[in-house]
Image: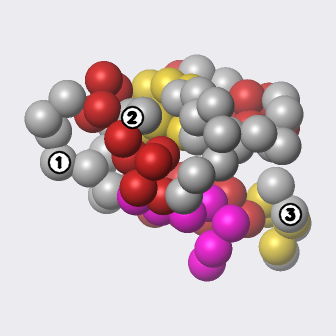
Amino acid sequence: MLPIANKPMLMYGFYQLIASGIKEIGVHPGTFAGGNFVDALGDGSKFGVKVSYIAQPEPKGIARAVLVSQKFLGDSPFIVHMGDNL
């Protein structure tokens, strides 16, 4: 949620996903993020998408995040975007 040019860093990637036509976005808020993600993204309706929050009990890396996302992903293609990277 670090602001860059008056916008939380997370939002740059989020808006790119939306601009790419993605309509369902799963978010791993992490163990330390708290409600900030929920406050910023909500259920996604204000952006025209559906946002689901996926719990990852322990931070064990990107591969583990994908593994715990299996139910959300099903057999659909997916993108992994690190919200703290530009």
Q: Position of residue 68 (x, y in %)?
A: 42, 34
Under circle 2, the secondary element is loop
Residue shown at the point (30%, 32%) measured from the top left: 70
Residue 50 circle label: none
Label 2 sits on residue: 69
Residue 58, above or below 8:
above
Question: Is 68 covered by the magenta stretch?
Answer: no
Q: Position of residue 42 (x, y in %)?
A: 67, 25
Query: For this rendering, which residue is in front, 32 or 10?
Result: 32
22 left or right of 65 in image: left
Residue 77 circle label: 1
Q: Amino acid at mark 1?
A: Pro
Residue 2 circle label: 3
Separation (CA) of disc 2 from disc 3:
25 Å
Going from N to C along the chain, the mark reached first, 1 or 2, is 2
Residue shown at the point (55%, 63%) measured from the top left: 82
Foreground mark, 1 or 3, reads 1
Foreground mark, 1 or 2, reads 2
Image quadrant containing the N terminus: bottom right
Circles 1 and 2 in contact, beta carbons < 8 Å: no
Region rendered in magenta: 80-86
Separation (CA) of disc 1 from disc 3:
29 Å
Going from N to C along the chain, the mark reached first, 1 or 3, is 3
Circles 2 and 3 in contact, beta carbons < 8 Å: no
Under circle 3, the secondary element is loop
Residue shown at the point (61%, 78%) measured from the top left: 86
Going from N to C along the chain, the mark reached first, 2 or 3, is 3
80 left or right of 15 in image: left
Q: Quadrant of residue 25?
A: top left
Q: Amino acid at mark 3?
A: Leu
Separation (CA) of disc 1 from disc 2:
12 Å
22 left or right of 50 in image: left
